Image: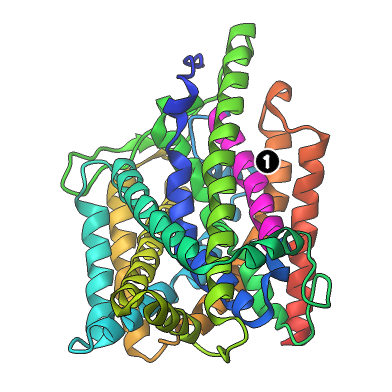
Amino acid sequence: MTSLKSPPSIWKTLGPSFILLGLALGSGELILWPFLTANWGLGLLWGAVLGITLQFFLNTEVMRYSLSWSESVFVGFRRLSSLLPVWFIISTFLPWSLPGFSSATAEILHTLFPGISSTVFAISLLLLVGLLLTLGKSLYQTMFRFQTIIIAVCLSTIIFFVAQLSTNATWALVPYGLVGKGDGWWLFPAGLNIATFLAAVAYAGAGGNLNLAQSYYIKEKGFGMGAFASKITGLLSKSRSAKIRGNTFPQTASNHSRWQHWWRFTNIEHWLVFWLLGLVTIILLAVLSYSTVYGQEVSSGLSFLYAESQVIGMQLGAGFGRYFLLIAAVMLFSTQVGVLESSARIISENLSLLTNWRKNTSNPTRGFAVIVWLQIGLGIVLYLSGLTEPRTLITLSAILNAAAMMVSFGLLFFLNRRLLQSAQQPGKLRKGILVFGALFFLLLLVVTVVGW
């Protein structure tokens, strides 16, 4: 068994959560919560708080395992049952194979540049994602740099638009919305489509099995026992086989002290980047939606984004309206990059857990590249077959991901109780939150299925 290394300063722990936040930018943040706000106002923001808070606890429990073992959380699940890799392959493949984000990006770009068809844009963007993910030297560094730049550019742009277009009266409604008070209603307004609300709660963050990909980012950043785990390089870099199963650390006083430092730092990093910055982004985009299109008829597709762009163009100038749409396309593209990266990691590793468990070796780089390009090929086929309506695809995907999150909450409850040493196991409060998360998503799924 290998001893833990000492953690760095708090500022050097910043990084892994930017990738997960980038996954969320183009789904709940840009599309679903602003869409709900455009139709029902700011009173539904409580759902965003609930969704992102539940995901914070889910993600940090994923990190708890990866700080303690030099392996991903999916290897831990395989230790629990040989059938679980099958579940993770299916529950990742089905919702994330729908080309919702590339379809939405292509539709916006076609609006900005009508001389190029949306089909050409959609296929070209998928191919660009494949090149980006397979040609870099280090997959983690590629994703971290890409998503950090995207977040910085997009967030600064959103802040500018909100500062120009929102009023004090609008901001006065935000605290009420965070506790569920709308215009004459509490929690749920009349006429709200529960499936869309479920999708928004599930996407108040990354959503679905992609939350579990935080395990990879902790490993490849070298946090805790992740310092001794294998990493995915670019396809053109020298790749090698690596052991599938990892190790935990001896339960010495010094190791326990170091683990506590790692646990505290990673929680602070995830709270600052994922929870706080993610919630601020949701609120900013909801306020922008309310300030520009609340009360208008925005009931299909991406019409509310175009309506926002039109209002921005009328109030600030046509160029700003077009720039808003361009930033929206960039946010959607960043999500598509993150979706393919995380889902390909999950699918490829779980396939390896099915086929190479006894051998205990695999080539993570090669397996990842194969799955990325297979997913891109499937996305192109699905898009050409006519599955192109963005909000319907994203909503359906979110419902499937809510089911996956329900299972993940339950599995993490058992995983961290059974495979972690007693000193690293979650306390009663976190166990209770994991149970609540599983039951919450179960309830929402039942309500949605019955009402659909």
**In front: 293, or 328?**
293
Name above or below for residue 422 compared with residue 430.
above
- At x 71% / y 69%, what residue is drawn? 44
Q: Position of residue 310 (x, y in %)?
A: 41, 84
Q: Position of residue 422 (x, y in %)?
A: 74, 24
Name the residue type under label 1: Leu
Quadrant in the picture for the C terminus? bottom right
Q: Is residue 431 left or right of residue 22?
A: right
| SS for callout 1 | helix
Q: Position of residue 297 (x, y in %)?
A: 58, 92
Q: Which residue is denoted by mark 1 in the rendering? A: 415
The question of residue 191 being in magenta is answered with no
The question of residue 62 being in magenta is answered with yes
* Residue farthest top in this picture: 253
Whether residue 90 is visible: no
Q: Residues within 10 Å of mark 1 (few under 14, many from 20)?
A: some
- At x 23% / y 69%, what residue is drawn? 127
- At x 77% / y 72%, what residue is drawn? 182
Does the magenta stretch mainly form a helix, a strand or a loop?
helix
Magenta residues, start to end: 48-67
Image quadrant where residue 318 sits: bottom left
Image quadrant where residue 150 sits: bottom left
Q: How many marks?
A: 1
Name above or below for residue 242 compared with residue 319.
above
